[in-house]
Image (cartoon, rainbow, N blue to C red):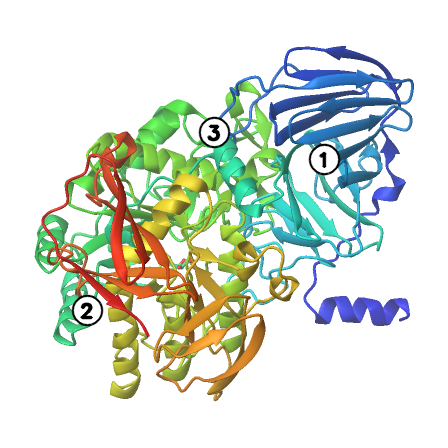
Amino acid sequence: MNRLLALIWILASGVTAFAQDITSLEKIGPVTSIVKSDQSITLNCRDNSQVVITIYAPDLIRVRASFTKPVPSTNHSWAIARVAWPKPRWNLNETPDFITLTTDEIEIVVRRSPLLIEFRDARTHSVLNSDERPMSYDAQGRLNNIMFDPKVGMFVAASKKLGFDEHFYGLGEKASHLDKRRSSFVNWNSDTPGYTERTDPIYQTIPFYIGLQRGIAYGIFFDNSYRSYFDFGKSSQQRAWFGAEGGEMNYYFFYGPSIKKILGRYADLTGHMPLPPLWALGNQQSRWSYYPDKMVEEVVNEYRRRDLPLDVVHLDIDYMHGYRVFTFDKERFPDPKALTKKLGRQGVKVVTIVDPGVKQPSDKNERYHAYDQGLEKNFFQRRRNGDLFVPRVWPGESAFVDYTMPEARQWWGDLHSIYTDNGIAGIWNDMNEPSDFVDQTGKNQLDVVSFDNGEKTTHAKNRNIFALLMARATYEGLERLRPDRRPYVITRAAYAGIQRYSTMWTGDTNSTWESLQLNIPMFTSLGLSGEPFVGSDVGGFIGRGNGELLVRSYQVSFLAPFCRNHKVIDGYDQEPWRFGKYYEDIIRKYLKLRYTLLPFLYTTLEEAHRTGVPLFRPLMLNYQDDDSTYNLDDQFMIGDDLLVAPILKTDVTRRLVYLPAGGWYDYWTNKKYTGGTMISVEAPLDTVPMFVRAGAIIPTGPPLNYVGEKPVDPITFNIYPDDAGTASTILYEDDGISPAYKSGNFRRTKMEFRRGKTETKTVEGTYNPSPRKFNFVVKK
Ligand code: GLC
């Protein structure tokens, strides 16, 4: 391809030009001496660089490098939930050429000259991951994006040898396929309405990935919030590298070999997702925007009249008085408390959107409490020269809060009392990349200085953590305002660690089949990146939808943790009934099925909270040794037991489905299959192919119109015996609403089926559910 053709190809394919050539960077110098301490070693290098390798756990190692100067004493990250780790057993061994650190699980072999780090399995000594070249840096700022001042920092990079058969997963929210091999990505939180496959970056930054080769997995979390780059063998067949335009080379290495174990450790390090209220698993409806209050009531009435289940309705930006956050428009919503009460009697909760832009009054005499207080307390972001930073968002000229200040977070959280006092059940954070209509690339914000734990750093470092800290302020505010309730927050943008504070949705998708095809790899990749509670606007957000697309979209989302139909201001109405009875009847079937599956979904969600293993899974997470699953983008599993293969194209009513080894039951017909093969199945519009793993028991409850409508009684255990005639499950229950589960107020019931009988094996926890009958149905 000549250069012109290559350029045209890049532009046409929508790929962000990604020209970083890390081979031109300076390499860290060789090791001259080492210092050992309790849990780490410090390597001093000939060029005055320093590397600290810290053993956090037998399977978790941190590598921190500072180029041409010592590693600074400051050591703070907004992503990290746990800083103190008990000292694990480890040994150090030195030879003239190598330094070897050994834990019970990993061997870290450091070559002194050139400085190269290799991670091996401590038992088999087989190589898991090794440096392709020494860690490197760009003191001249040649690789920094032209918009940054080189003084902001230097480009730092680490480069790993690319395995011949190495696959890459995770990296959070990317408009891309499941296996990221041969792709490269940029992380710079960006408002990208109508994004399509390969638009990059989009809203979130989760610089964590999992490498998998020959069934053995490791993880790398590059905890650096500057604009970062990941290249998994795209620019070169030799290397997988990552780097950032500032900050430290600072990464954590996780060893599995199982991906599930890595996800558990990642959750230990960056935080476990707390359980949201159970009603968050209910069906949700949104629109830009429902107003006035009567219209919200009409939507809810329509849901009830049509016998469609519903738990939550969302109020988009037009509920506010002139887009002023923490206000209600007096004409459209004269009595929000009465509204939430009324809807509450119908079993429906209200979630309101809260954007970061605090409207700047256009008239000096106008009083607006959020703006006045923020200004007076000096909580708003300022430019380096002290000027207030004035972005333009929905309310026009606005101010953003410096959420890196603890007092500002506290104040912002407390402002939510207007919502909790009015019975609002949850908060939806949007536009928090942060979006600025003046310039979406961040150029307008470059000289904004944030407090940042006293370090007074600029936008280059803080853009990607803005949403994380806004969500944190919101979550902690809700916790203070309603200590007996679990907070429910939804966010668009994020940085690693977001799961501690918020659930998420994938932003402004299109109402197209191509956009629908991104749902599964995006949900599964987010799950592999520590964010289990995900979903996408059902039916797509921008553009013209239709009944067929809406139905097929529900056939993915009815099992996603976040199931919310939402639509742009000028699109076709998209509530389940809007394209006619034919489609509405099918959607009803799937929404009802979601509600009967709630005991199963909630049990699997609690597993995600406790273990970090997501509910909505790619098949490779359950079948890590099966390479037929490594790039499967159009099937998913819920937990270990339910496999779903939706139709993602128009006018298609048959598809191939891959069933991994083992026995499987067709969910609809109970027909048995032996896996390890592809099968072809019928999938007319009213059918999504679903299969249950032989050996599973799926607990289901009674049909509900909303969570809490009536007691979950009876619970039916649907038993799918394997070839040996056995099956088992665990049922998790708690009060669904309070944080008491954190102190043991839950009930975990383990069931086993053998020789035609079901036995309750163990019961754990102190929660006493209301009396309910257990039914057992054995599938044949
Ligand atoms: C953004 C959000 C979208 C919302 C709109 C208006 O585009 O992503 O969900 O409806 O803003 O608030």
Which residue appears at 30% of the width and 80% of the height? 586
Q: Is residue 369 visible?
A: no
**Lower position in the chain sequence, tag 3 or tag 1:** 3
Cα distance between the residues tagged 3 and 1: 31 Å
Image depth: mark 3 or mark 2 in front: 3
> In screen coordinates, is 456 left or right of 499?
right
Q: Is residue 416 visible?
A: yes
Say above or below: 719 vs 530. below
How crowded pointer 2 is (Cα within 10 Å; few <14, some 14-19, many 20+) is rated as some
In the image, 85 versus 727, the foreground residue is 727
Q: Tell me whether the residue at label 3 lies in contact with that at label 1, contact meaning CB atoms closer than 8 angstroms.
A: no
Q: Which mark is residue 149?
A: 1
In the image, 212 versus 653, the foreground residue is 212
Amino acid, disc 1: Asp
Which residue appears at 46% of the width and 58% of the height? 507
Residue 166: x and y, percent?
73, 53
In the image, 473 versus 41, the foreground residue is 41
